Image (cartoon, rainbow, N blue to C red):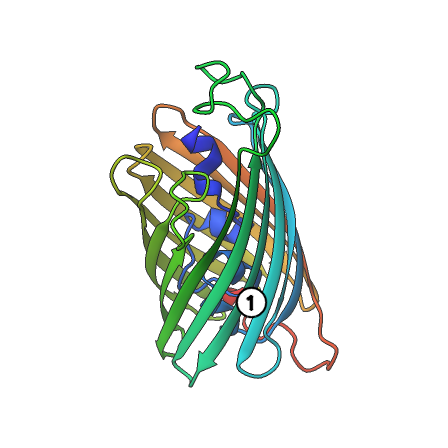
Amino acid sequence: MAEGYDLGNVESPRVLAMGGGLVATGASTVGLYQNPANMELTRVYHFEAEGAFSPEARRYDVGGAIVDSANGRFGGGIGANFGILDPDGIHRSWTDFRVALSYQLGDHFAIGLGGRYLGVDQDTSVGPFGDSLISSGTPSKPLGQYLTFDAGMTITPFEGLHIGFAGHNLSDPGVSLAPTTVVGGVGYDSHVFAVEANVLTDFTTWQTAQVRVMGGGELFLGEHVPLRVGYRYDEGTNTHALSGGLGYIGQQWSAEFGLRRDIAGDHPATMMSLSLRYFYDSTGTLGVQDPGAL
């Protein structure tokens, strides 16, 4: 179950394809979920629709997000995601709402803060312990409802190089449905390529803190076609995974696909994600100035 739910993460195709972590360079709608400070990395006004699917876990996700960082040093975003896990078994479902703000302090430092509502429900009497709160839902109310927050910061020593830190579910709900995690990463992006490495620590899901290591790279062909590869090792599930993806990013829209496959582990799983984005520009001056940072 831990593999299928995967910390409750919402991963765009770019995140998925590059190993699972873009805390340093993931801007636009990626920043809303990875590191709210990163919404200030680029001047954008983006709309995104996204869907993800895992055949082994029978997990389905759909959602959308809007991020506006087009004017000044403030940025903001809002997103909603709806998921189902194992619909013929435990039938866990969740609703995940996010709202975030970012602020750029000078040219080299940005901070961000995000709020999250997570509501989770699950069928009763379908777990290994029967009609039990340990492995089932409750007959009259959701399995859990949580209000929590994320925070992040990004340091840019010089153009292209970014160092990011973020904490997720920092109110410490104390449940694996909304685990408290801290992640740090270093990345470099340009108009031609991007690379990044992240280390995440999960303080909630397991009996002791467990580490997840993620890394990936991206190469742009013809300024519009990104090719992506990544790797992830998860200490908690003891799995190694490879990932990859591609897409098309134009001046007004993008279509992107990402895929991750566990290559070693007790319960290997696959996750795939597809997104469509629209880049709105009421002034006609923004465009996609740095597609590698999106």
Q: Measuring 65% from the left and 75% from the top, which residue is drawn there?
A: 287
* Nearest the eye: 289 or 6: 6
Measured from the top left, where is residue 255 in percent x and y?
Answer: 65, 53
* Nearest the eye: 228 or 88: 88
Task: Please say whether residue 146 is visible from this viewpoint.
Answer: yes
Measured from the top left, where is residue 111 in percent x and y?
Answer: 43, 72
Q: In the rendered view, does 128 fall on the left or right side of 10?
A: left
**From the image, which quarter does the C terminus lie in?**
bottom right
- Please tell me whether residue 233 is drawn above or below residue 154 in the rendered image: above
Which amino acid type is shown beneath numbered disc 1? Pro
Tell me which corner region of the image, top left, top right, bottom left or bottom right, holds residue 178: top left
Q: In the rendered view, does 237 fall on the left or right side of 6?
A: left
Measured from the top left, where is residue 42 in percent x and y?
Answer: 53, 73
* Nearest the eye: 216 or 198: 198
In the orientation shown, which residue stands out farthest toward the left?
Answer: 208
Q: Which residue is mark 1?
A: 291
Q: Measuring 47% from the left and 59% from the top, which residue is drawn there?
A: 219
In the orientation shown, which residue stands out farthest toward the front?
Answer: 140
Element class at badge 1? helix
- Please tell me whether residue 153 is drawn above or below residue 286 in the rendered image: above
* Nearest the eye: 77 or 258: 77
Measured from the top left, where is residue 113 in percent x and y?
Answer: 47, 66
Q: Measuring 61% from the left and 24% from the top, which residue is drawn there?
A: 87
Q: In the rendered view, does 14 fall on the left or right side of 153?
A: right
Q: Residues within 10 Å of mark 1 (few under 14, many from 20)?
A: many
**From the image, which quarter does the N terminus lie in?**
top left
